[in-house]
Image (cartoon, rainbow, N blue to C red):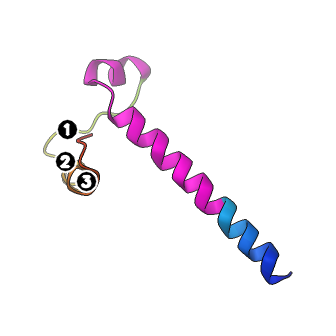
C-alpha cells in the first residue's frame, strides 16, 4: 500500500467525520419540540456531556 493511498483514505475519513459532525450540529440546533418529533435524543440540561458540548460548540444540545 502506497503512502498516497493511505493519505487518500485519511482524507476520506476526515471528510466523513466532518459531514457527520455538521449533521449532528444541525440536528442539535433544532428546537426541542422538533427534535422530539423526529426522534432525536434530547439531552437534559444537567447532562455533563451537554454542558461540555455547549462550551465547545457554543450551542446547547
Quadrant (top left/top right/bottom left/bottom right) for the C terminus:
top left
The numbered mark, 1 or 3, whose residue comes first in the sequence reads 1
Q: Are marks 3 and 2 in contact (CB under 8 Å)?
A: yes
Mark 3 → mark 2, Cα distance in angstroms: 5 Å
Residue at the far right: name it.
1
The answer to whether residue 9 is above or below residue 39 is: below
Q: Residue at x 59, y 61 (%)?
A: 14
Q: Residue at x 55, y 47 (%)?
A: 19
Task: Please give the range of residues in magenta.
Answer: 13-38
Q: Residue at x 41, y 24 (%)?
A: 39
In magenta segment, residue 18: yes
Mark 1 → mark 3, Cα distance in angstroms: 10 Å
Element carrying mark 1: loop
Q: Are marks 1 and 2 in contact (CB under 8 Å)?
A: yes
| Local crowd size for mark 2, using a 10 Å CA cut-off: few (<14), some (14–19), many (≥20) | few
| Local crowd size for mark 1, using a 10 Å CA cut-off: few (<14), some (14–19), many (≥20) | few
Query: Disc 3 designates what residue?
Result: 49
Query: Disc 1 designates what residue?
Result: 44
Query: Disc 2 designates what residue?
Result: 47
Q: Are marks 1 and 3 in contact (CB under 8 Å)?
A: no
**How far across and down, in percent of the image, does residue 22 sit?**
47, 44
**How far across and down, in percent of the image, does residue 48 sit?**
19, 54
| Local crowd size for mark 3, using a 10 Å CA cut-off: few (<14), some (14–19), many (≥20) | few
How many numbered tags mark residues here? 3
27 with respect to 47 (left or right): right
The answer to whether residue 61 is above or below residue 38 is: below
The answer to whether residue 41 is above or below residue 16 is: above
**How far across and down, in percent of the image, does residue 60 sit?**
23, 41
**How far across and down, in percent of the image, does residue 43 sit?**
26, 39
Q: Main secondary structure of the magenta part?
A: helix
Q: Quadrant of residue 28?
A: top left
Element carrying mark 3: helix
Amino acid at each position: 500500500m502506497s503512502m498516497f493511498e493511505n493519505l487518500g483514505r485519511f482524507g476520506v475519513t476526515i471528510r466523513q467525520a466532518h459531514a457527520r459532525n455538521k449533521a449532528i450540529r444541525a440536528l442539535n440546533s433544532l428546537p426541542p419540540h422538533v427534535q422530539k418529533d423526529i426522534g432525536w435524543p434530547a439531552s437534559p440540561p444537567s447532562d455533563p456531556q451537554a454542558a461540555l458540548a455547549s462550551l465547545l460548540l457554543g450551542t446547547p444540545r
